[in-house]
Every structure is written in C-alpha cells, then in structure tokens.
Image (cartoon, rainbow, N blue to C red):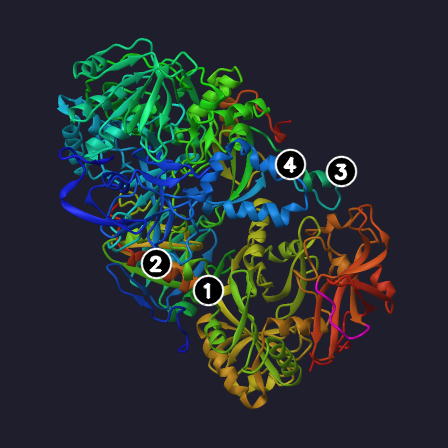
Amino acid sequence: MLILHCPYCGVDADETDLHAGGQAHLKRKGPDSSDADFEDYLFMRENPKGVHFERWRHVYGCGKWFLAARCTNTLEVFGTYAAQTTAPPKDLLDTISEKRPGWSWGISK
Amino acid sequence: MSTRLVDHGRLINKNNAVSFTFNGKHLRGFAGDTLASALLANDQLLVGRSFKYHRPRGVIASGAEEPNGLVNLGAGATFEPNQRVTTTELFDGLTATSQNHWPSLEFDVGAINTHLSRFLPAGFYYKTFMYPQAFWKHVYEPIIRHSAGLGRAPKARDQDTYEHFHAHVDVLIVGGGIAGIAAAQAAGARGARVMLIEQTADWGGRAVVDMPEIDGLPAQEWVNNAIQALEKMNNIDLRLRCMGAGVYDHGYALAYERLTDHAPDQDGPRHRLWRVRAKQIVTATGAIERPLSFAGNDVPGVLLASAVRDYVVNFGVSLGDRTVIVTNNDDAYRTAIILKQAGLDIPCIVDARADADGPLIYQARDLGIRVELGKGIAKVKGGKRVTGVAICAQAGEGAVLEELACDCVAMSGGWSPVVHLWSHCGGKLIWDADQVMFRPDHAKAPTGADGQPFVIAAGTANGHLFTAETVGDGWAAGRAAAQAAGYAKRGGQAPLGADTDEGPIAPVWLMPQGASQALRAKAWLDFQNDVKVTDVQLAAQEGFESVEHAKRYTTLGMATDQGKLSNINGLAVLSQALNADIPNVGTTTFRPPYTPISMGAIAGVAKDALFQPIRKTPISDWHNANGADNEPVGQWRRPYAYVRSGETVHDAVNREVRNVRENVGLLDASTLGKLIVKGPDAGKFLDLMYTNMMSTLPVGKCRYGLMCSENGFLMDDGVVARIAEDTWLCHTTTGGAERIHAHMEDWLQCEWWDMQVYVANVTEQYAQIAVVGPNARQVLQTLGGMDLSRDALPFMQWADGKIGDFDARVFRISFSGELSYEVAVPAGQGRAFWDALLVAGETLGVMPYGTEALHIMRAEKGFIMIGDETDGTVIPQDLNLQWALSKKKDDYLGKRAHDRSHMADPERWKLVGLETVDGSVLPDGSYAIAAGVNPNGQRSTQGRVTSTYYSPTLNKGIAMGLVHNGPDRTGEVIAFNKVDGTTVDAKIVDPVFYDKAGEKQNV
Amino acid sequence: MSNSVSALQGKVATAKVMVRDAGLRGMITLRGDITNTKLKAACAGLTGVDWPAPGQANCVGDKGLAWMSPDEILLLVPYAEVPAALGLVAKALKGQHYLAENVSDARALIQIEGPFAAEVLAKLAPVDLHPANFKPGNFRRTRLGQVAAAFWMRDVDTIDVICFRSVADYTFDLLATSAAAGPVGYF
C-alpha cells in the first residue's frame, strides 16, 4: 500500500484513492515527428530498479494529476510535485542525488 | 491419560462449567478453557489425522503455531473447517468434529498410506502422475481431487457479518506480552497515538505462565498494573483477540480482531479487519518453541515442553501422570519443575547436551528428578498415544539403552523468535549461532516512504529470551518508535526484570545425531503435511537445493500453519544434507497473514447487496418492475429487453424493434456520458480530442464525433452539441463517461496546461430518454410545450425548453434511423417524465425498448458500436470513417499514429455488411475462412464478424464484419466457420441494410 | 421543478447512529481561479459563509462552500435557488474563464448523526477520522467502500456525505449497515 502526498490538496492519500499513470515527463511527438521518435514516445519506457518518476492521479480526491519520484526497489518516496512541468524540480533532484549518489534515469541521460 | 488437576488453572473458572460436543460426544469444560485444554481434560488426546498418511494426530502446542488440532466448528450457516483447537475459546454449546478421516477418527482407512509411505516419497505427485498423458483426465485428476483439501468447504451461506475499520496510529504494537506492554508504556507516555494488540484473550504472553519478577513484582501482578494504567490513557487503544496479520509497504498493517468467536450469542460483527496505517510498528510477537526430530515425535502425547506447562498452569490440565522431558536447553527444565511441583511424575529429563549446569538443572535434581545428559530419544512407543520412550546416546545411531514407560513426552528444541511481521515487508534476518535462532537484523529493517526503518522488533521476537532483556528491549522499542513518529518527550523508566541464569543451548537437528534411515523416516518435521527428515534429505539428494524449491517439492511448511514449527528444523536438515551453513541456506519467504484469517473478514460488508455497487438511473426501479431482463454495462444494469408474459427474450426484442419502426419506443439513455467542456480554448482542445472538427460546429447544432487514442485506435464516439460560444456538451458511450472525462483531464492537466478549458462530468445530472419512431413527435407534442416541428428543430440540432412541466434539453439525433428525439431532463424529474411519456404515448403505441433492440436497429442502419466493431486494435479507416478524419487540422490525438506503416497498410481488414445466403444468423465472433494454413498449421482467415443479429425488420440474419479488401469485394460469397466445424456462406454487402437514403429520420 | 425527487426519496435507517436522506439540495460545481476576489465575493454572497481553506467545508443550514480542489469549489444552496445562483455567478464572473454547472440532481446527500458517526465512516473510508485529526469543518473527498464520495463534519456527531446519484442506494446501505453493526469504541 503506497501512501503518496498529493501536492494539490495536501492529503496523504492511500494507493486506493490514486490512479497510476505510468512514466512521467514523456515528451509528446506530434504529426511532424519521425517514425523512430514517435515509436519511442509511444512505446519505450524506463523500467528502473531504483529512482523512477511517475504520474499519479488523485482520482478519488481532488482529481489532480501529480508526479512522484520514488525508488522502485525500496518504495522510498523522494517527493511529489505538480504535473505542470517538463522536468523535476531542482531541489528534488538534489535530494535524490544525496540519497542515491550516481543515480540515473531517462531524463538525465 | 490426560486429565484435569485439582489445583492450577489460572485462566479457567471452575465454578462455570461449559458443555460442548466433539464428534457428537457430550463433554464438559470450564469457562476460560480453549477447545484444546477442554479436550485434553476429557482425555481426548487424538484430535485429527494428518494430511498425507492419515497418521493419528494429537495436540502438540498451546497457541497459534498448532499444526495438528484442526477441527470443523459449528454446523450449517456457522460451519467452518480447519479451526485450531488451541486458539478456539470454549463456549457453551460449541460443536466440533474432527476432519481428514474416513470412516472415523479412531479407525481411518486412509491410514494405510502410512504403510505405503515408502511409495509416497517427496515429490510423489510430480513423479507418479506424469505418464501416460491420457490418464490425467480419468484417473489422476479424480484421485487428486478426492484426496485434496483439508476439512470440508462450507455448504451453507455464512450467516455472520463482518466489517473493516481504518485506523491511523503513530505506533502499532503487535503482541501483548511483557515486551509489548513495556513498549506501549514508553510510547504512550510520550503522547503517541498507540494501538496495542494481542492475539489471545489474555495479556502477558509467556511471562504470566513462567512468572519471573518485574519491578519486584510477580509478572502477573506487574502485567495487571500496567494494563490498568494503560487503559486509563486515552491515547492508547488496547485490543485482545486481535492478531497482527500482516505488515505492508509504507506502514500499512492488517489486524484481525475476533469479536464473537468466543461468544456467538453476542450481537455485532463476528470479525473486524483493521486496516491500520502506522508511522511505526513494534513487533513484540514473542517466540515459538521448536520440536525435536526423533522417531515417533508425532505420536499423540508428544508435545512442546512449553505447551505441557501451559496446560498445567493456565488450564489445570495434565497431559499424563508420567512425562519424559527431552531437551537441548535449560528452559524445558521449567516444565519438569512445574509438573513435579504439581505432583506429577517425571521419569527422566533426557538432555541431549553432554554438559548442562545451572540453577534450573540443580532445582530439578533437588526435586529428585533424574537427569540424563548426552542422551536422546531413539523412539517413541505407542500408536494413538504415547506408551513409553526408548533412550539412546545422542552421539550414536540409536541403539536403545533403556526403555521408560510414560504417557507424555515434552520436547524442546529451543526457541525461534516470531519474525514473520518483521519479514513481511522486507526485514532481513541474521543467524544467531549462540542462541541457535534466526533473529531480526536491525541493520536491515523494513523501510517506509521516507526511506527510514518503520518496524522495530522487540523483546523475545528480537531474540531476547530473558525477562530483563525483554522488558527493557520492549520499552526501548516503544520509546524509539514514539520518537521516530515525532514524539521526542523524554522521561519514564524502563521496567526491570529479574531472571534465573540459564546455560547455553546446543543445536540438535536430529536425535540421535546419527539416526538410521528407519528412525529418520519416522522423525517428523511438518506434522500437518507429513514431511519427515528423510523427505527433505531426498529433496536435497535430487537436486532441490534452494530452500524455496525444497519447500515446494516436499510441501514442508505449506500447510495451514505455514511451517511455524517445521521451517527452522527443515532448513537445518536441508543445510546438513547440503553440507552448508544454515544462514547460507536461508529461510523461505514469510508471507501474510500470520495465521489464516476468515474470508468474511477480508470481504467485510461487501456481501449480498453490498458485494459491488450497482448503478441505477432515475428510471431503473420502473424497468425492474416492468419485466426488464437486465444486462450489465459496467456497474449499470441496463434493460436488454422488457419481457412480457408468454414471451421469450428473443420475442420481446423483436417486438420492441418492430414497434419502434412502426410506432414509437422509449429508451432510457441516461447512462450515456455527458461532459461539459467550457472555456476560451475549448474548441481548440476538442479539435485535438476528436478526429473531426468541433471548433466550427455552430451553436445549436450537433455533430457525431470520433475519439482516438494517441496510438490511433478508436476509443470512443458520440454526439457533440455546441451549447454556447465557449461551451460544448460531449456525449460519450455508457462505459466512456468516467474514462473520457479522465482522458480529457489528463491532457488538460499534463500536456496542454496552458489551455483555458474546464471540463465537468454532468452525466448523472440528467435523465436522458430517447423517444424514437414515426410517432415520436406526436408523443412529445401531446405533453405540450416547446415547438419540436421539423422546421423548429431540424435533424442534428438541439434546443432548450419545456415539455409539459419538464425542463428539457432536446437533441434531434438518431441511432436507429427513425425520427428520434433524445430528451434530457434533470435526474430528479426523470422518472416523472418517463411516466408522462408512457401516458402521452398510450394511444400511439408507445413501448419501452432495451439495449438489444437498440443494437439491432443501429446495425440495420450500419452504425458502428464502440466495443463491437472496435476492440482496441481498430482504427477509423478500418470502419470506412475517413470522412470523420479532418484534413484541415494539423494535429489531433491519433493523427500521427495513422501514418505509421501498419496503420496505413491497404491490406487491413475493413468493415462490410454480411448476409448469409440461407438467411440464418452468423455466429458471433466467427472467422471468414481463407485458403491454406498459417505457419502454426491453423486455417488461414480473411475476416471476422463484429456484430451479428436477427433483423426482425428484414426478417433475416444481418451482420457486420471486418474483411480483407472487404469494400472492394461486394457481392462475393465467403465462408464463416461455426463451432461445430462446418461453415456458413455469407455475401459481402453494403453495411447499411435499411433506409439507405436516410429518409425516415429526417421528417 | 415541483416534480423533482431526490435519489433516496426520504429513506431513513434508524439506529444509535441514524442514516437519512438529506433530501434535495442545490449544488453547483464552480471551477475557476478560486483566488479571484470576485469569485469569492459571489460565493460569500450566495452562501453567507466564510471561504473554506483546503480540506475544509463551511456549511450553515442548507448553504455552504466546500473546497474541492485548487480550482474547484462546491456551492451548496437551497435546491430551488440554483437557477438564481447560477445567474448571479454568471453576472459576477462575466468575461472571466470559469465553469459553473448545476449538479444538484447528479448527487445524493446523506446525513449520519449519532454518537459514533465518525466510526461509521471509518469503517468505510481510508481516512484518519480520529477526533484529533478530523474535526467539525473538515472535508474530505475519498471513497466509501467501492465508490467515490465526499463528506464533511458539521459537528462531532453529524457528518454529511455526498455521493453520485446512481450509487445512492449502495452508499446508503453501506452507511446503514455500518451504523447498525454498532460502535467500535476506538475514537
């Protein structure tokens, strides 16, 4: 049972109040994209044992999507943040670096 | 024989006799007894039969770890199998029957298996039932099914009720022994919100049996004082009969409270499942004594040494007049001392250790008890009960030195901390070679959302076997847990315990250590599943070296007790067979629940009418009172047809279709999704959501729209109405209301968050009724109100107004090809409006119609249905819906995907109409056969049926399907397969079967 | 609108904690910039209650405001006053980007009242309803059993529950069953 903090309404919500939405920070590829880029956007996903960035919706609560950085191995949650961003906030990245030195993820490649 | 003692029995009330039955026999016990103690008091040593060999089995333990004493409890609506006698509190009128035997407990035919044990080795099922393959269905499977299962499944519905409860606590303490109590004192004093739970009906754990001193008081007195003080604190919740069942991620824990099992006449739920979110969890779950592995250790009358003294001290029950103690540690001497002091005979303490020395040994000797060091049990004598033991040298192979008559053997192989809850969520263990036990490794505790440990093992569960350590550790754990939960207040003082010194334990995994094959084959590890030392050794020999493999190959630890007694002994035997160290072999995974919990508790209130939510429209009650044959559509129940007396469902469907085509029908369309999309950017947003153009739709008009996922596949369709300059109303399918709402919110919040658009789901605000058929206008006009004439409200337009007294929004849209109005009224007026329409239409032939008539009529018109023509792999082009793909738009969801090579492939199967040559109805899901076979040797296919119906309008079977190059093959006849292996010929036709010119809907 | 009926049509389950249909209530979903002073003023004018903080609802009688999300407020007014209220909102927010929809008929309002009202809810919702944490004025959107719901505490013994109309029967029965099963003695 994951418990995640909704950054919009301030509730620590049980997983049963949430809906998981897969990997965060995907960059949409539109009509002009190449086949390879579009395939990457549609199908290719990170599957790390460790630091991961995910989309969650507080579906039974305020209805807002938010993003979460957590460790898929220990389930430690480094932080949650608003969905209206293309990259994780700097202070969160610093926290992760402190806790998981040398970590990497798709967006940091 | 086992019997009741005159003295002793701290838990029973001898002034309150209780009667119960066992296998129909009327017996008496006392209030405070467990079923186990009451049976033993009545000399009922034999309580069941083992699973595989049907060996006679007696009670071996006194608590939750009991593997043998499983009975059927109750009858009829209260029947429940596999209930442990040791944890079942006796009540007046209890009925129990033994299980897993035929014809009787005393004489069981299945016991012949024990003589066949040579032929039923580990992995027996895997080895025996392999060949020949043809034997599976008629020979092997019936045999396995007949012998599978323990107890009998209940036949009657459970009459009891159950509930859940959500509790959020700072500190959950599992275990109400002295460590748990001390933890509660420390955490409670610091102000934390604490829940202290104990699985039995009694506080104090082992201490109140063995009665050491704490803070200068006998343990019982200390416990009583402590509990009284804790009860007065309003930040502490104390619960007896409440077991910590499981510990899960982020501090979630399940606790299982048995409210009325001991008092069935009491009102209220039988069990309560606590769904606890704890900041910190203290597992003060104590320890379980291990059996010793010697030949005949499963004979009724062989018990754990601690259980023997529990029965004396707690229940005043003696297992026999003469008890032989066999041990590898000092603690078992306590049993000898207590029994001797109770006036019972101890013929000998058989101690496997070559040296043993210390106060307990002296005390036993002083009482005149014979102590034999370096000795072991070669063999237990007796069948259905112990008659004696043969003693041998522990170092030898089992040569009998002496035989002693006795009626009970009390064994102790040392203590294993209950590490289950610590381990459930990832806590690791270390092997403590000095104490011969696995105990929690605090450097590798389960961690929570903050990455910090959230479980603290305390007391005996943490490997502390002495009172002083246990209470001190419990107190420290409570303090640390409170602190970690944010309660930093200092103060208070840890309780001080006093102990009797004990000498070291010696590891003894087999007795005697060089036991012969014959002896090892009678030395049981798992009593319930009949796993012996030889089975584990065979598993190792056959290559099942991983402890997890050995477990499954032998079934060690797979019984209802989940190996509480057998796991450590089993893996020690395995490690010896592999010449490996115990920590290198490791344990199997501990999984919740700690002991079985009832299915009722898991379900809680979710049974009968509350099993799942059934969604109702404002008109559902009318449907159900008027013959509705419902079909589930998500959690809705929609009428499939309204069946009149004397009709079949098929008759009703045909009648409804004809009536709509000829007169007028009413459909409850309230379940269709209705989403309001509003804002300066709403048009732009909808142009991205839909494949067609919605921004250009004039106010007052309706347009049919398609939605694709980003992958290009069709996900929903529906009519969009433009309500105002900045407001659109999007209809979705019934199943799409929540899904499409979420889909829109997702894109608005996560991709186009700069767009000024709000979406609201108003599906349930309206009852929506489709009035359909040539007389539709007349019915509505009978009610009076707004002008619904052809000129005032043309096809594909909408208008607000009044129909009669009703606030209505009327859409001129048609899914049947008939003159049709979909009228939305506020849901609170829905039923009244429906009733008014029935009255208004009485002379015009009005009838309600169901979803099947709806489906047939749309198929007659060649309209696609999401979920029939689409299945998540179909794109608009497959359904000849290119007209709905806007070429003017730069972008919309699915546009890029439609350019991918496979999507643009001209070879994709495309939508056609199908008519059987003989007029029959094509089978649903049927495939069109093509020449040749595919690489798997299956017949090649060239298409499939997506919808198929009998059309009462055309009086023949009609269908739609996806066919290779279909639209180019009009007139061609192709064969479709049937379940019976034959085929049926069908002609490819235009999918519009009825009123191709669309004249009927546009009047 | 004289022919309007609530989903539960006056259903009552009597026990130590009573569960009853609170009848028709006007409810307006208002989405917009809820920091906007005009929007706040319009809401205050319509309901006469203070602006709710996140996680709060302020309700007096039939009127109230509940904080639904950072861009959504639920307005509670008498059922018959909804059209007028929508008119006032439209007037106050003219020219601004907002959404106001009448959802009165889309919902059911159920009141639970009695000495262990919070425990009745705690049997069903994954929420910390301990009196130290959930107090009068607190509001929460979550789930009850298997459906979405929202509830707020009027006073320690009275909690109002909103659910969707289609699951009104389910939600009512869920609450009534939990109330009939008696107190837990935890809070």
Distance from Cα at disc 3 to Cα at disc 1:
46 Å
Q: Nearer the viewer, mark 2 or mark 4?
A: 2
| Amino acid type at mark 2 | Leu
Q: Are marks 2 and 4 in contact (CB under 8 Å)?
A: no
Subunit of label 2: C
Distance from Cα at disc 3 to Cα at disc 2:
54 Å
| Residue at the farthest bottom position | B843
**In the rendered image, which residue does mark 3 sit on?**
A36
Residue C166: numbered disc: 1
**In the rendered image, which residue does mark 2 sit on?**
C175
* 10 Å crowding of disc 2: few (<14), some (14-19), many (20+): many
The span shown in magenta is B917-924
In the displayed structure image, the side of residue B181 where residue B880 appears, left or right: right
Subunit of label 3: A
Q: Are marks 4 and 3 in contact (CB under 8 Å)?
A: no
Q: Does residue B307 lie above or below B841 as drawn?
A: above
| Amino acid type at mark 3 | Ala
**In the rendered image, which residue does mark 4 sit on?**
A45
| Amino acid type at mark 4 | Arg
SS for dot 3: helix
